[in-house]
Image (cartoon, rainbow, N blue to C red):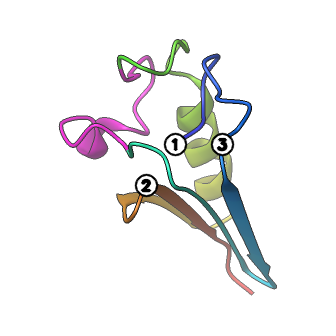
Amino acid sequence: MCHGRAVDPGAEIEITVAPTRVAVADRGPGIEPSLLPHLFERFRSGRRSGGSGLGLAIVDWVTRAHGGTVEAANRGGGVFTLALPE
């Protein structure tokens, strides 16, 4: 997934927006499988991200504060889905 400081300027990113759901997907190498269960924890980042490990933890915190959920998966690259209640 293209997060952190190391973003490929030629990356193909697909964003899907619906009334209560946003999905962001790319066709990159995906998320390190060992990182998936810990992706939304503070100060956890993958070897390729170059980030501090705070961005996705903040996304998770704000989403939950609004009664929503955020998930990450590997499906042809990285896929993040954020859902909010109606």
Q: Which residues are magenta?
A: 31-46
Residue 15 lies in quadrant: bottom right
> Mark 2 is on which residue type?
Gly
Considering the numbered disc 1 on the image, is that residue within a helix, a strand or a loop? loop
User: Which residue shows up at 60% across the image and 32% down it?
Assistant: 3
> Distance between the Cα atoms at labels 2 and 3?
11 Å
When asked about the image quadrant of residue 51, the answer is: top right
Q: Which residue is mark 1?
A: 1
Q: Main secondary structure of the magenta part?
A: loop
- In screen coordinates, is 32 left or right of 72? left
Q: Is residue 25 left or right of residue 39?
A: right
The residue to which callout 2 is attached is: 77
| Local SS, label 3 | loop
Q: Farthest residue toward the left? A: 34
Q: Indicate whether residue 32 is drawn in magenta.
A: yes
Q: Which mark is residue 11?
A: 3
Q: Please tell me whether residue 54 is drawn above or below residue 70 in the rendered image.
A: above
Among numbered discs 3 and 1, the one appearing first in the sequence: 1
